[in-house]
C-alpha cells in the first residue's frame, strides 16, 4: 500500500529496505489492529503528502514577511494560509501555528503570560492534568508553583467550587483548564468568571477537544480564554504539532514566546500540513465526522457500562472515555496488556477515586475509518469478552482483523 509519496515512488524501498520495512510494518499494524488511543487519529493522504514534501527542507526562523532566512516567499504563503484558516475555523483574532507540539504550545503560553515562580492553578495530575500542568518531572512543575484542583470522587466531574475556593486562597497568576482524560465539556464561562474575580489569566489547554470544537461538537474556549493551546493531531486529524489562539492584544507576546523565546526555525512542512488539516476541518464532512465521533463514544461508553465496567462520570460528551475494569476482575494496567494482546490498542489512566488504574479510550481514529454505532457496540462486547476471559486472545485478534478489514484507514 502506498500512502506517502516516498513509499509511492518506491525510493525508500530501493535505497533503504530496512526503514521501508519498518514504515510498512507500522502501516500494517495500524491497519490490522484497533486504534482506540484517545489522542490518536488517521491523518488524510493530503496531510501526509504535505508532511512528505520539500517544504521539509526550508529554514524559516521568524514570521511571514519577517524571516531570518532568504527564500521564504513561498513558505510565507503557506504559513499565512494556515494562520488565516485557523483564525476562521475557531473565530480567533490571532493564531500561532508554529508550536512544534501541544507541550510546546503550553510552554509558550506560560512564557507569554508568566514569570518563573508564579502560582498557577490547574487540574491536578492524578485527576487528568497534563505533564505541563505542574508535573515535578516537567519544566512546569520545576519553574512554577502549581496548585491542583480536583474532580469529585463520586461523580468524576470537575469540582468547580473547590477550584474557585483554591483560586481565592492562592491568587494564581493563571488558571489552566483542560485535561488529558476529562470526558465532559468544560464550563469555560465559570472558569472565566473565577479568573476575573482573582485577576488571573485563563489558559485553555484544549489539546483533546479542539477537533470537536472545529466540527461544532464541543464548546469553543476561544471567547473565554486569554490563550488557547491545542494540538493539531488529535481529534483535529492534522499533523503532529501544536498551535495557540488568542486575542490581538496578546498576539505579539504569544508570537515572541514561541519564536525566539522557546523555539527556533518553524517546521514549514508541518505548517503546510496544518493548513491542509484546517481546510479539511472547515468542511461539512468534518462537522459530520465530529458529531459521529461523539455519538460513537456515547455508544461505546454505554456498552462498556452495560458490560460492568465503571465509566467515569457515567458517560461522555466527547471522543474520550475513561473506565474502571476492576469489576471484571482486572485493573487498568493488566487490562491494557490483555487487550493489546488481542489487538485492541488503548491507554491506562488514573481514576478519580485513585485506588487503581483505569482504561482511557477514544473514538477519533475508528470514526475516521468509517465505523459507526453498530461497530462500537461490538467493540464494547469484545473488550468485556477479553477481560472476562470469555474470548481468548487469538480469536479476539481474528475478530479485530475482520472488523478493521472492512474499514481500511487508507483504502487502496
Ligand atoms: C496531548 C496533550 C498535550 C501535549 O501534546 P504533545 O503534542 O504530546 O506535546 C498537552 N496538554 C493536553 C491537555 C494534552 O491532552
Image (cartoon, rainbow, N blue to C red):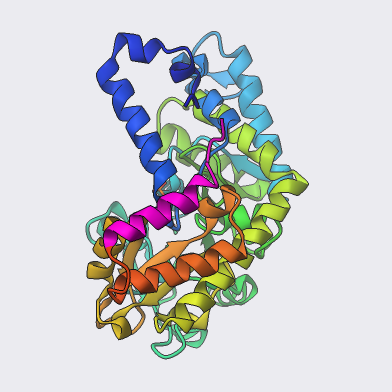
Is 165 above or below relative to 255?
below
The residue at the point 46 percent across, 81 percent down is 305
Position of residue 398 in the picture relative to residue 83 (left or right): left
Q: Quadrant of the C terminus?
A: top right
Q: Is residue 409 magenta?
A: yes
State which quadrant residue 335 falls in.
bottom left
Q: Taken as a whole, is the magenta stretch helix, strand or loop? A: helix
The residue at the point 25 percent across, 83 percent down is 355
The residue at the point 45 percent across, 14 percent down is 57
Q: Position of residue 250 (x, y in %)?
A: 60, 48
Position of residue 80 in the picture relative to residue 320 (left or right): right
Q: Position of residue 132 (x, y in %)?
A: 36, 56
Q: Is residue 222 visible?
A: no
Is 384 above or below relative to 379?
below
Which of the pair 91/212 is nearer the observer? 212
Q: Position of residue 28 (x, y in %)?
A: 38, 37
Q: Is residue 308 visible?
A: yes
State which quadrant residue 325 falls in.
bottom left
The magenta span reads 393-412
Q: Is residue 115 magenta?
A: no
The residue at the point 62 percent across, 20 percent down is 76
Which of the pair 345/127 is nearer the observer? 345
Q: Residue furthest bottom?
A: 154
Amino acid at each position: 500500500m502506498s500512502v506517502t509519496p516516498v513509499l509511492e515512488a518506491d525510493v525508500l524501498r530501493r535505497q533503504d529496505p530496512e526503514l521501508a520495512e519498518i514504515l510498512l510494518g507500522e502501516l500494517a499494524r495500524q491497519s490490522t489492529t484497533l486504534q482506540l488511543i484517545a489522542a490518536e487519529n488517521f491523518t488524510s493522504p493530503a496531510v501526509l503528502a504535505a508532511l512528505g514534501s520539500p517544504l521539509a527542507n526550508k529554514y524559516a526562523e521568524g514570521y511571514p514577511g519577517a524571516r531570518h532566512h532568504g527564500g521564504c516567499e513561498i513558505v510565507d504563503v503557506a504559513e499565512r494560509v494556515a494562520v488565516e484558516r485557523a483564525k476562521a475555523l475557531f473565530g480567533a483574532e490571532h493564531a500561532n501555528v508554529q508550536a512544534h507540539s501541544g507541550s510546546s504550545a503550553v510552554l509558550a503560553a506560560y512564557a507569554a503570560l508568566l514569570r518563573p515562580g508564579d502560582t498557577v492553578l490547574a487540574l491536578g495530575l492524578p485527576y487528568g492534568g497534563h505533564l505541563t500542568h505542574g508535573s515535578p518531572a516537567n519544566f512546569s512543575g520545576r519553574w512554577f508553583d502549581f496548585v491542583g484542583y480536583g474532580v469529585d470522587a463520586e461523580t468524576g466531574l470537575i469540582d468547580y467550587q473547590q477550584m474557585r475556593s483554591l483560586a481565592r486562597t492562592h491568587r494564581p497568576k493563571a488558571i489552566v483548564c483542560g485535561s488529558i482524560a476529562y470526558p465532559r465539556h468544560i464550563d469555560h464561562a465559570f472558569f472565566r468568571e473565577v479568573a476575573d474575580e482573582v485577576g488571573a489569566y485563563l489558559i485553555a489547554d484544549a489539546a483533546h477537544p479542539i477537533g470537536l470544537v472545529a466540527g461544532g461538537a464541543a464548546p469553543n474556549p476561544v471567547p473565554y480564554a486569554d490563550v488557547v493551546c491545542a494540538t493539531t493531531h488529535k481529534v483535529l486529524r492534522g499533523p503532529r504539532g501544536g498551535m495557540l489562539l488568542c486575542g490581538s492584544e496578546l498576539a505579539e507576546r504569544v508570537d515572541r514566546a514561541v519564536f525566539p523565546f522557546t523555539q527556533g526555525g518553524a517546521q514549514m512542512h508541518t505548517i503546510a500540513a496544518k493548513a491542509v488539516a484546517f481546510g479539511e476541518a472547515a468542511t461539512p464532512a468534518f462537522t459530520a465526522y465530529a458529531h459521529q465521533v461523539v455519538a460513537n463514544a456515547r455508544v461505546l461508553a454505554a456498552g462498556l457500562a452495560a458490560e460492568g465496567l465503571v465509566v467515569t462520570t457515567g458517560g461522555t460528551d466527547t471522543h474520550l472515555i475513561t473506565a474502571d475494569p476492576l469489576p471484571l476482575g482486572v485493573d487498568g494496567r493488566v487490562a491494557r496488556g490483555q487487550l493489546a494482546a488481542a489487538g485492541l490498542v488503548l491507554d491506562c489512566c488514573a481514576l478519580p477515586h485513585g485506588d487503581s488504574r483505569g482504561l482511557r479510550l477514544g473514538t477519533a481514529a475508528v470514526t475516521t475509518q468509517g465505523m459507526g454505532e453498530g461497530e462500537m457496540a461490538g467493540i464494547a462486547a469484545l473488550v468485556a469478552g477479553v477481560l472476562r476471559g470469555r474470548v481468548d486472545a487469538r480469536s479476539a485478534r481474528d475478530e479485530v482483523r475482520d472488523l478493521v478489514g472492512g474499514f481500511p484507514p487508507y483504502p487502496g
